Image (spheres, rainbow, N blue to C red):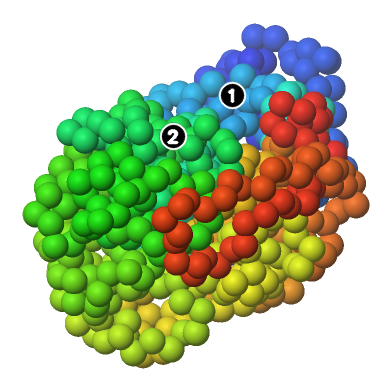
Amino acid sequence: MSTLPSAADQDGPALSQQSAADQGRLPLREPAAADLARTAARAAGDLLAPPAPVRLDDVVPAPEQVRPDPGADYLLTPDAVIRVSTGPAALAVAEQLAALLRPATGYPLPVTDAARPEPAGGIALVLVDDETLGPEGYQLDITPAGVRIAAAGPAGLLHGVQTLRQLLPAAIESRTPVAERWALPGGSITDRPRFAYRGAMLDVARHFFGVEDVLRVVDHLSRYKLNHLHLHLTDDQGWRIAVDSWPRLAAVGGVGEVGDGPGGFYTKADYQRIVAYAAERHITVVPEIDLPGHTNAALVAYPELAPAGTVPTPYTGTEVGFSYVDPASERTYDFVTDVLAEVTAMTPGPWLHIGGDEAFKVKREAYTGFVERAQRIVAGLGKTVVGWHQLAPAGHVDGRVLQWWGTDADDPTTAEAARRGARLLLSPGNHAYLDMKYAPDTPIGHDWAGLIDLRRSYEWDPGAHVTGVPETAVLGVEAPLWTESVTSLPEVEFMLFPRLPALAELGWSPRATHDWDRFRDRLAGHGPRWTAAGITFHRSPEVSWPTEAPAEVPAEAPTAAPAAAPAAAPVPAGPMPAGPRPAIPTQPGPDDAPATAPSV
Ligand code: TNX
């Protein structure tokens, strides 16, 4: 809490009095009684004020270092200003901060890049030349006089902003003004990530999700300092990205999805909108074109790519492993080259994901030959190849990344690929798969990799998970959400929350901070935030959610059973049985969000 403001902190009358005194003259006028009363009332209010409701060490993911100073809370007031020290990059983050804080506070929060070396008061965002913070680290200082976020780059500033957002009362998530005391806990945080790659995957092929839904998922990633969005753009049930040189892929292959929905696809403009929106949040989009299996939709569009003697038909079921492009045909490599070149041209990030999973019907040698050629095509396009860990036996190419989705962390082939230089992206099916059910009665999701409650999603160590793979070979973590049974944004959120923050903490926080009991305590305060933001979440019984948060309301009727399998029967290797499903409990959607947030 602040002490009495010094003369220099005060406005109008006090300043003129001070300068008059400096000049050895009598003040021009005595401070008005009302001014004195206001100053006294403010000081008394500060002294009597309750401490900030959120503790400095309640942040998720846990920061590297937290130094609380309980006597140094900061109160955000209606006249606060957001100042930046340098340049357009910091200014953009300052605008993002203002946009996050304006709706609930109702404060104008003007953003200014007034060139003052160390701006006083309000919130200052400062770019500094400090290599120790790295590209994503930040330093946050909260004192009664103001808040300062310093970072070496805009990504670090934005991470600092997300921390600041979590330190304000939960009602900050409301989209309409709330009468609240906007206090921030005093102290300092120094923070930077453990792993460079922290992401989530959204399968837009099994069920299609429109651009707005994807942007909202991007917001969720940003909230928890994730920096990659992997889009699973193609699969048996749908091809979701426009490709000019093979136009039927989207026009024909984009029709339909699991069940009887219409499907859809992203135009190039749609995709670029997602990429740009993510980039503004320092999130890199990783596009996946799944090859050589999971290609039924492409084969329906272009039967010439199918192995001789097969007649592909649209597929709306949930089996896997039955389709593949013909690895023996040169036409297949024209297709792969053209598609990957067009995807490369609209993807600024360094990665191209070529899938490689569950190509059960392709013989081992043909598979390896195909993957090695596809890897070379990706390298030729100047991108770094990513693939599911089934790529491991194929020859090494520079920088390649294998996405581990196994459930028994003992895989000599993957360990050997890591020894040859591959980096690992960890998505263990039994910890990181967001399409697994939380519990036997979770109304949607699978259980082939086991049930994944919050504790299971938290209790593993990415740096020591796969036998024989050292932490130095681990690029990071990713939580995939497959959508065979996930049909809407509330259902996406229900599977993401609260497990996505657990994964985010594994990717960001130093291992020394790992502590299940502290984690679930810290996370509990996020329930009211999600409620205020209109985010649907699973009220995991492992967390003592504050009682004020509204209970889950059943909101969905069971959907129809997915359509039957096509005549050319797929291999029944799918992990998920098709069939009707029960209702999922959801919270009010964005439009029904409460106007004011419940207090924590
Ligand atoms: C396995 S994990 C798959 C997906 C399914 C998922 C369902 C992986 C690389 N392949 O095709 O959607 O299981 O959990």
Residue found at x 70% / y 69% = 453
Above/below status of 349 relative to 92: below
Depth order, front residue of 170/201 = 201
**Is residue 208 in sight in this rendering?**
yes
Depth order, front residue of 61/389 = 389
Q: Is residue 556 left or right of residue 461?
A: right
Look at discs 1 and 2 and give the one toward the viewer.
2
Q: Is residue 318 left or right of residue 356?
A: right
Q: Secondary structure at mark 2?
A: loop
Q: Is residue 39 left or right of residue 242?
A: right
- Whole-angstrom CA distance, mark 1 to mark 2, is 46 Å
Depth order, front residue of 345/118 = 345
Residue found at x 60% / y 16% = 16
Q: Position of residue 185 (x, y in %)?
A: 70, 50
Residue found at x 59% / y 59% = 435
Tell me if mark 2 has few (under 14), some (14-19) or many (20+) residues whose alpha carbon lies within 10 angstroms of its own. Answer: many
- Marking on residue 255: 2
Q: Residue furthest right?
A: 547
Q: Position of residue 144 (x, y in %)?
A: 66, 43
Tell me if mark 1 has few (under 14), some (14-19) or many (20+) residues whose alpha carbon lies within 10 angstroms of its own. Answer: many
Q: Is mark 2 within 8 Å of ligand 1?
A: no
- Marking on residue 285: none
Q: Which residue is mark 1?
A: 109
Residue found at x 39% / y 45% = 313
Q: Position of residue 381 (x, y in %)?
A: 12, 50
Q: How many marks?
A: 2
Q: Secondary structure at mark 1?
A: loop
Q: Position of residue 328 (x, y in %)?
A: 14, 62
* Upstream in sequence: badge 1 or badge 2: 1
Indicate the amino acid at tag 2: Val
